[in-house]
Amino acid sequence: MVIANFFGLGFAVDAYVVALRIPNFIRNIVGDAALSASFVPVYSSLLGAASEPKGARRLALGILGPLLAFAGLFAAIGVLAAPWLVAVFASGFDASASALTVRMVRILFPMAGVMIVVAWCLGVLTSHRRFYLPFVAPVLWNLAQIVGVILGARLGWQPLVVVLAWSTLIGSVLQLGVQLPAVRRLVGSLRPRWDPNWGPSRQVIRNAGPAALGQGVFQISSLTDAALASLLLDGALAGLYYAQRLALLPIALFGVSVAVSSLPEMSREGRIEGLGAHLEDGVRRIAYFVIPAAVVLGVFGDRFVSVIFLRGAFRPEDVHVVHWALGAFAIGLLAQSLVKLFASAYHADRDTKTPVRYATIAVVTSIVTGAGLMFWMDGRGFGQRAVAGLILGGAIGAWLNLTLLTRGLARRGTRGWLAATKRDLLRSLLGAAVAAAVAWSLEGFVSGLVGSHLWGRVLVVLAILAGGGAAYVGVAGLPTRRAGRRAR
């Protein structure tokens, strides 16, 4: 919100988005994918074995050593190669935007190195069923950016977007620092080891390659989206960024969190046939919250964008650009939220290769389809809103990926979760439809009473949430965890 108020849909945010995505390309591959898919299953299984508590500690510290070495090397190479990276991934930028992006890439590559170690902390904590701290710690990352931008504006530091980049780096250090004490208590030390020849370490390293490759496919898609969006009018990439911030909220809260908490439990299961109860519980919980969230973003996204962003440099016409992007995100929101859960089932079975094949097919489909839709919309005068075509291609790819993952698990004997959750899914869909109708009526009624000023827009959003939420709960009921109880 603060970024939007200070920068709007300007080229400065376009430069920041690209500068953030380039180092995140490698960070997400090594941290989010390789560690969660390869380290967590092995580490969790060692924790679950009563005879292996020392083995679990040895594995954690033995992985930390190579990870620190890679993070340092990665940051150094990124700083040196920044001009070439920007030339490849932001070819549509002019000279001034490219120079600004190079400057911020050199700031943000060390941030990505720090976040690789943060991902290691996440793997350790969640394997020990410590979920609160690793999911609250990112608040410090966001607060650092907010404080940095406000302080920079007050003190006149320029360019302000570079202040934002430095604040992002500082936030990553804070996010790591707050988790290290808890990790140290769990593993007994923070002294890294080099132990690549030990059996569990070899297993982690062997499985990390395909997992990293699979996440690399998704990251190539993300960078390709940024490169394609940079070819549109200035501000299209910023519109994609703001919409993505809102769309990622339900994905992170309900999709990623359920998948991350389910992976250690599925890893302790030991049999892929026994994962159906975990999938049933996860699908039910994710769908209950994500389906109405998709309706809110797609139908009432402009109301929320106007309340959150519409002030300062953010203009009324920018609201429509972000709303179009949100509508496209809403189509694939449920699939994107479920993909990580079903991929975790393969990872729990120590299979990191199959999800890579499915992801590759899905990403190629999303890039080709998204680029075609984007250029088609751009040629018909949609301007910045043509970025919605790019996002729609990603939604199509997400649904394809989910279909491939579920069919693959069914062939391995993991069945029954769909039949067990079908009734709940239908109730959620019906509840979301009724809630949308109720909220639509309330939106028109309240808007006529309060006007279009800020507090009027806030009251409209509150009416949408209160009325629509009550209608949704009335039809869909409250969330249940029947399968989870059976699994435990």
Image (spheres, rainbow, N blue to C red):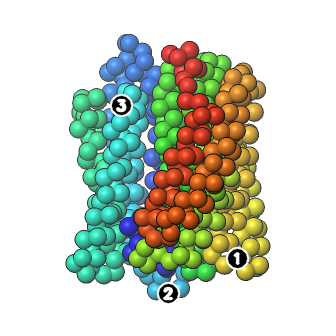
Q: Could you say which is closer to the camera, residue 67 or residue 423?
A: 423
Extreme residue toward the bottom, this view = 95
Q: Quadrant of the N terminus?
A: bottom left
Q: Residue at x 77, y 78 (%)?
A: 380
**Residue 250 picture location, percent across and down:** 53, 47
**Residue 382 picture location, percent across and down:** 70, 76
* First in residue order: circle 3 vs circle 1: 3
* Mark 3–mark 1 CB contact (< 8 Å): no
Rendered position, 392 above or below 401: below
The residue type indicated by label 1 comes to Phe
The residue type indicated by label 2 comes to Ala
Q: Which residue is mark 1?
A: 382
Q: Can residue 280 be seen by looking at this rendering?
A: yes
- Secondary structure found at label 2: helix
Q: Which residue is mark 3?
A: 130
Q: Which residue is mark 2?
A: 95
> Disc 1 to disc 2, how far (Cα)?
26 Å
> Disc 2 to disc 3, how far (Cα)?
47 Å
Rendered position, 146 above or below 378: above
Q: Residue at x 50, y 56 (%)?
A: 461
**Residue 414 picture location, percent across and down:** 69, 23
* Mark 2–mark 3 CB contact (< 8 Å): no
> Disc 3 to disc 1, how far (Cα)?
47 Å
Mark 2 Cα shell of 10 Å, populated few (<14), some (14-19), many (≥20): few
Name the quadrant containing residue 353: top right
Q: Residue at x 43, y 68 (%)?
A: 454
Image side of residue 80 versus residue 363, left or right: left
- Secondary structure found at label 1: loop
Name the quadrant containing residue 168: bottom left
